Amino acid sequence: MVYSDIIETIAPEKTLMETLNELLSLDIGGFSLGNILAAALIFLVCLVVIKLCVRLTRRALEKTRLDEAVRRAVVSVERIVLWVAALLMIMGKLNISTTSLVALVSVAGLALSLSLQNTLSNVFAGVTLLVTRPFAAGDFIETGTTSGTVLRTGLFYVTLKTFDHKEIHVPNSDIAASRLTNYTAEPERRVDLSFGLEYSCKADEVRRALLAAAAENGKVLREPAPEVVVNAYLASSVQYTLRCWALTADYWDVYYALNESARRHLEAAGLSLAFDRLDVRLVKD
């Protein structure tokens, strides 16, 4: 092959590349065609990625205890954040200055976070409760001075139902910052009842009477076995404590039933419950 043949072979390829470069650099409304095509490609990729992320988030939220409205809000926020990021990428590819937009978004975010400080703290506390899962719907919990059965966990509040059927909405931040007791986390719970008896009562007789009261209650578990201990020596009485176990669902039934039957067994055994009294002695000079 001679030198002229080589030139004829290479020349058409260089011409095609030059033509393609000229086409991509074609100005359309102040933007080059190449940047527009690249921006369009970024848009399509972001569209697919955002749809995939939203779908995965929805599947993950379906496994949580959050309400449907809360799940929709989380997905909406995620979609907005992802589209803002995609918009910044597209604007950067089109050589549009994003400095002012980023500054505007930063200032707006700062102002929004300051104005919604308490709300955001509840949101982050709700996420913490969602991750750690210290309780579930139907559990009886006590937090601070509030106790009740958990009805639902929201993005801002936890709704409790009290014994007298009042709904209480406790902010998530209050629950996350205070001591939380979950009474239904375990299947069994110990019932402790204390009784003050006179010093004249014998400990063995008191023990037999209280254990008899526990034995006649069918909801008291046999294992661990009930026990009676001397808890304290007070000014006017000796304090005995009856300890027995019951299913968590039967706790209050056992508690109130033993309160009633224990006194009946004590009185049947001739044992008297003590009461505070003051002995006054008169001394003559």
Image (cartoon, rainbow, N blue to C red):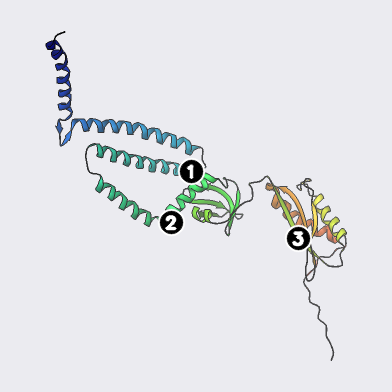
Q: Which residue is mark 1?
A: 67
Q: CA distance from mark 1 to mark 2?
A: 21 Å
Q: Residue at x 42, y 34 (%)?
A: 55
All told, the count of numbered labels is 3
Q: Crowding near pointer 3: few (<14 within 10 Å), some, many (20+)?
A: some
Closer to viewer: mark 1 or mark 2 = 2
The answer to which of marks 1 and 2 sits earlier in the sequence is 1
Read off the residue under disc 3: 194
Q: Which quadrant of the view contains residue 234?
A: bottom right
Which quarter shows the C terminus?
bottom right
Q: Are marks 2 and 3 in contact (CB under 8 Å)?
A: no
First-in-chain label (1 vs 3): 1
Question: In the image, is 137 to the left or to the right of 276?
Answer: left
Front disc: 1 or 3 = 3
Compute the Cα span from label 2 to label 3: 43 Å
**Above or below 277: residue 183:** above
Residue 193: x and y in percent read 75, 58
Q: Secondary structure at mark 1?
A: loop
Residue 222: x and y in percent read 79, 46
Q: Residue furthest left?
A: 4
Q: Read off the residue under disc 2.
A: 118
Where is residue 56? Give x, y as percent: 44, 34
| Along the line of sight, the residue nearer the viewer: 224 or 96 | 96
Inspect the image, locate mark 3, and give the three-letter code of the amino acid beneath it.
Ser
View extreme (front): residue: 2
